[in-house]
Image (spheres, grey):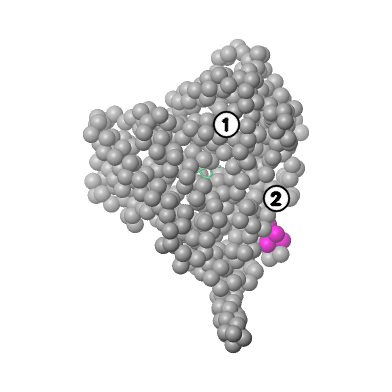
Amino acid sequence: MFGSLVLFAVVLWFFYFLLRNRRGKNFPPGPSALPLLGNLLEFSSENPIPDLSRLARRYGNVYSLFLGPQKVVVVNGLQALKEAFVTRAADFSGRPHGLLLNDATQRKDWAPGLALAGYDAQWRDHRRFGLQVLRNFGLGKKSMEERILQETQQVVRLLEESAGSEVNPQLLFHKLASNIVSRVVYGSNYDHNDPFMKSSIRAVRENTKILNSAWSMIYDTIPAVRNLPLPFQKAMKNFKELNEKTAEVIQEHKSSRLPGEQRDVVDCYLEEMDKREDGLSFSEDQLCSFAQDLHLAGTDTTSNTLLTGVLYMMAHPHIQERCQQEIDFALEGKDKVAFGDKQKMPYVQAVIHEVQRVANIIPLSIFHCTTKDTQLMGFSLPKGTIVAPNMASVLWEAGQWKFPHDFNPENFLDDQGEFVKPEAFVPFSLGPRVCLGEGLARMELFLVFVTLLRRFRFVWPAGAGEPDLSPVFGFTMSPQPYKLEVRCRETADH
Ligand code: HEM
């Protein structure tokens, strides 16, 4: 018995030193790693973000961890993040493979989509195409605004029916964000009542939970468990169904489309395929991945930001009231808000940005990886190193903000009360991989937020205790589930 224990301890130490030494020469420092588990035990499964900041205080703004056998470099603070994603953009804009997010989506090698694609010609082609179609579908024009306002009116009607009672807004905001982006991608027949959208919303909600859980960390850390019947198999099944259903929707588009008439992103893509004919970069499989990327990336992010915004408005009623005064004044005599009205609402703009800052919606962005051997803040990183930006370390960085740790719209206002955007405002990330949907998201957040605050007062229900502002950690952060009491505002001019 004693002999076995000694042997076990020796093997453990062997692996320990093996892993410790694998950091390599001039690689960023970090805590010692355990065999198999890497640095998994350094982190709270509830919310590892404070642990990441604790390690930055100990090892500096660029340090390393082991995610099982893989090395991950964590980047903290604006200076290091800019050096990586902007100054050395070409070296730091790759995407890693072999994590749960990659495996669960079951993408074919030639059809990685956009968000998880490597930094290569196919990604560049699709990125350019994506920006162009979003522009053509009305970003910067009235049609996108109309679409967003129409969808928001549905939420307004539902909230009006619930006036005086308590509502859980989670599903409402999720469907709103999903509808806006799916109308652009799949066309107007695919709203949340359509069976395809219903099952895709269900799959996305279930998968977000799984991808956000400790199971995701376990999958990424311990390759040996990947084929076991554990919850991540459910995510694989959901994505398989989603892939099949998206392929059916593409077939429907193929049979009903008229040449030269583009109803949505899918039609535009099919037309682009016709033009290219080589079937290499643009293909039906790649369309399936690309369409899903836009839908997935544009749903939870926007809806969780709205959820956080309404929660903070209830927790800070005087800020809600000041927004409403500014909105009433700016929109006097108008029946609805336009995106251009934001110039007249510096305080509301400051509040929306402050909500995004404290919400830290994608806390580790989407992981990047190095495309070649490179340098960062004097350290050497070999090709293929996973790079995880700790977004909170910039969004809440001391020295970058007037009030880094408080919810305070003054962070975005100058001495004259005009809106200003500090450089450290990076919820959409920065560099060539910056969020493709930033323009759409900013338009949605402004139009929805203003329309809702103009029509309603949101009140924290009496008897519900104090609002809990602590987030639920995940690939996208969300507030703790909550209910709100909704009251119609009589003063609204509509
Ligand atoms: C508040 C809302 C949103 C936030 C905070 C957000 C944030 C982000 C972040 C942090 C990234 C990763 C950037 C990086 O890798 O460095 C990203 C990527 C991306 N986002 Fe968003 N996003 C939002 C809304 C949207 C919307 C509405 C869409 C779609 C229309 C969208 C589409 C994408 C796509 C396609 C990528 C991948 C870009 C690439 O890899 O080149 N996002 N987003």
Q: How many marks can you see?
A: 2
Mark 2 belongs to which amino acid? Glu
- Residues drawn in magenta: 53-57
Labelled pair 2, 1 in contact (Cβ < 8 Å): no
Q: Is mark 1 within 8 Å of ligand 1?
A: no
What residue would you read off at disc 1?
169
Of callouts 2 and 1, the N-terminal one:
1
**Considering only vertical position in the picture, is 418 above or below 376?**
above
Reading the image, the residue beneath label 2 is 397
Mark 2 nearby-residue class (10 Å; few <14, some 14–19, many ≥20):
some
Give coordinates of residue 224: x percent, y percent: 46, 67
Q: Quadrant of the C terminus?
A: top right
Q: CA distance from mark 2 to mark 1?
A: 31 Å
Residue 311 in sight here? yes
Answer whether residue 31 is magenta in the image.
no
Residue 370 versus residue 71: which sits nearer the camera?
71
Q: Residues within 10 Å of mark 1 (few under 14, many from 20)?
A: some
Inspect this view and state whether residue 412 appears. Answer: no
Q: Image quarter for residue 241?
A: top left
Q: Is residue 163 left or right of residue 54?
A: left
Q: Amino acid at mark 1?
A: Pro
Q: Position of residue 455 (x, y in %)?
A: 61, 19
The residue lying toward the viewer, choosing from 157 and 134, is 157
* Residue 278, x across and y down, in percent: 24, 49
Q: Quadrant of residue 423?
A: top right
Q: Residue at x 59, y 85 (%)?
A: 1
Furthest residue in direction bottom, as rendered? 3
In this rendering, which labeled residue sits more in front, label 2 or label 1? 1
